[in-house]
Amino acid sequence: MSTLPDLPLPPDPKLAQNITHFIRALRKAGLPVGPGRTLDAIRAVEAVGFTQRADFFHALQAVLVSCPEERLIFAQIFRLFWRDPRYLEQMMSLMLPQIRGAQTDRPADAGEKRAAEALLDGQLPPPPEAAPREEIEIDATATISTTERLRHLDFEQMSIEEIQAAKRVLATLSLPVRPLPSRRSRAAVLGPQLDPRRTLREAMRRGGEIERIARKAPLIRWPNLVVLCDISGSMSDYSRMVLHFVHAVANRHGPSGSKKAQAWGQVHAFTFGTRLTNITRHLRARDVDAALAAAGQEAQDWSGGTRIGASLLAFNRDWGRRVLGQGAVVLLITDGLDRDETGQLARQMQRLQLSCRRLIWLNPLLRWTGFAPKASGIKAMLPYVDSFRAAHSIASLEALAKALSDPHDNGERARLLQAMAQER
């Protein structure tokens, strides 16, 4: 990290209020800082003092930054918030290309954009009226690298513009699935199986003489897709992007019996936080914004608490038999951070796995290097899933196709179960 200039901070009788406002900006930019962190930050500043800018910076960083990935956004918001005029002008020029201020040759990254958007809170000054319009020439040679970077960028670290671009990419994705053989059959001239009944019926019409052997082929059917999406506070940013992806899948699947590779029998979607909500009918709307707006009004517990065990109990009791037939595949999107009693959670996970063909758990916490199943909820759920994969970027959602096409794919499940066994 670069060395901060050793400048004394001006005395301010409202330092506590400014720290609170600063932490609010961090929360808008995606850092998980709550009211408890505010008190800790104020106490840390009281203990360290704030006569030196570097001491003030490191005291706040020690309290408010939880992982290395958050340091960049913290540093950008700190410099922008605590009165660095040159940096503020640079951020304004980033948000409004018409403003010609202090610019550097270094391209602005996602952390800088998120910092500017969090502090400006969407309130941008009007552009100059007399500013001449310029024709911008786009170099197509950088398109591939930009698209690749967007595919692997964390949803939580995206700027507003990048989120819109990611939604457009998600709308084009498909989720291929292989058809399942059915016990029923259909008449086929070159079918692989003999059809004795049809052969004898045709023979009876001809006085018992068999002229040809009838043959048949098995029918194929498409499994259902059931999505259970966590919309609690810790999952809200990821669940919105995942639901955009589910909307695209729900509006692209073919009817039963379709020969298209991405066809599903039916697509059912449920959200849960403190309660279970069926949003299947809302996702049938063609317009994704209207569909998610209606789903948000239906799900009153958006960005609230988490009760995974109780929500799975409600699903297994009220909806399991209706939607899990015909070899359904279940996508469970949650971070597994449940504070309820883990015994019920384990029982409901086991029942869910036994009721479906495959249970795939998508967890955004897998984006962290060295992720380990420490939380009790994750330990209770992990043994009852068939595949455990990440869900924090476009690339991670694209990798779902691999999990569905390979019946032996288990993602990170085997490695994490081994880690749990070693702890015991």
Image: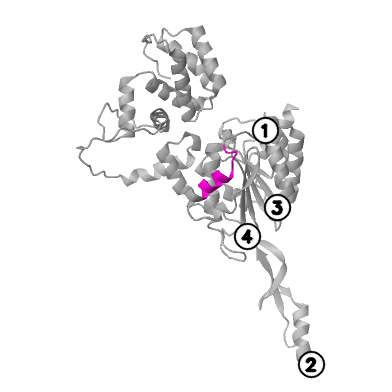
Q: Nearer the viewer, mark 4 or mark 3?
A: 4
How far apart are the two marked residues, 1 and 3, measured between alpha carbons?
25 Å
Q: Name the residue tied to disc 4.
A: 265
Q: Name the residue tied to disc 1.
A: 338
Q: Nearer the viewer, mark 1 or mark 3?
A: 1
The dot on residue 207 is 2
Q: Name the residue tied to disc 3.
A: 357
Q: Nearer the viewer, mark 1 or mark 2?
A: 1
How far apart are the two marked residues, 1 and 2, measured between alpha carbons?
71 Å
Mark with earlier residue (4, 3): 4
Q: Is residue 27 above or below residue 55?
A: below
Mark with earlier residue (1, 4): 4
Q: Residue 374: horizontal and vertical position, in percent?
A: 67, 28
Magenta highlight on residue 128: no
Q: Write the residue at 64% across / 60% down.
A: 222
The outermost residue toward the bottom is 207
Asked whether the beta carbons under mark 3 and mark 2 sit within 8 Å of each other, the answer is: no
